[in-house]
Amino acid sequence: DAGVTQSPTHLIKTRGQQVTLRCSPKSGHDTVSWYQQALGQGPQFIFQYYEEEERQRGNFPDRFSGHQFPNYSSELNVNALLLGDSALYLCASSLTGPGNTIYFGEGSWLTVV
Amino acid sequence: DAKTTQPTSMDCAEGRAANLPCNHSTISGNEYVYWYRQIHSQGPQYIIHGLKNNETNEMASLIITEDRKSSTLILPHATLRDTAVYYCIVRVMDSSYKLIFGSGTRLLVRP
């Protein structure tokens, strides 16, 4: 049973560019969330997708957008990249319903130069 | 903001129990205590969670005080591979799925 998988694992982008990160949830999970983790800090919630719609959003600008596909996989898109967007981007999945455990992938390291 | 307070760092000897404290004095009745850990450069790993009773699984034990204002995560026989940042999180068990992470405790297990 594969856990949460993310791609790519590492990437380097230039300021102003756009990036797309991908996530496949744990088998059977229908809810996907994205987190940003800057160096030395705890992960910060970006948004969550369920039934192909954004259900909840953290304090992130509109440059951060996402998508969930019918097979529950998800993408995180960041436009107009800033140096401050350099971080580990984590995908987390769970089964909808109160109390279900949230599982994380290994993350995608984004460096903006 | 995170609703928990944890020491910045701790250490323990390999083979000994590691006891990681967490304060959550403003916890509400419908909020659970969750523990995750993050080994360097990896994604957070779920450890255990509880509401008011003590919980144990293959990884750890969770002791929650009777007033629920604090808890302790116990790793019974710490190994070098347990060196990580440990996050204590209070989570409302409703349709909100987001986890609010604090700064966590950096546990160093010494040989």
Image (cartoon, grey):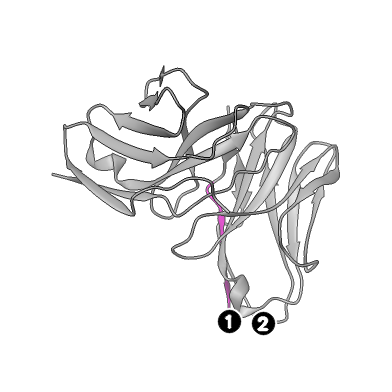
> In the displayed structure, would residue B96 be above or below residue A107?
above
A6 left or right, relative to B39: right
Q: Are marks 1 and 2 in contact (CB under 8 Å)?
A: yes
Q: Residue at x 73, y 26 (%)?
A: A97
| Amino acid at dot 2 | Arg
| Amino acid at dot 1 | Val
- The residue to which callout 2 is attached is A15
B61 left or right, relative to A5: left
Q: CA distance from mark 1 to mark 2?
A: 6 Å
How many neighbours does mark 1 have within 10 angstroms: few (below 14), some (14-19), or many (20 or more)? some
Give the quarter of the figure containing the C terminus of chain B.
Answer: top left
> In the displayed structure, would residue A99 be above or below residue A87?
above
A90 left or right, relative to B68: right
Tag 2 subunit: A
> In the displayed structure, would residue B26 be above or below residue A34?
above
Report helix, strand or loop for mark 1. loop
**Residue A15 image offset from top left, x and y in percent:** 67, 82
A79 left or right, relative to B75: right
Quarter where residue A100 is shown: top right
Along the line of sight, the residue nearer the viewer: B84 or A4: B84
Region of the chain picked out in magenta, as a range: A106-113
Q: Is residue B36 magenta?
A: no
How many neighbours does mark 2 have within 10 angstroms: few (below 14), some (14-19), or many (20 or more)? some
Tag 1 subunit: A
- The residue to which callout 1 is attached is A113
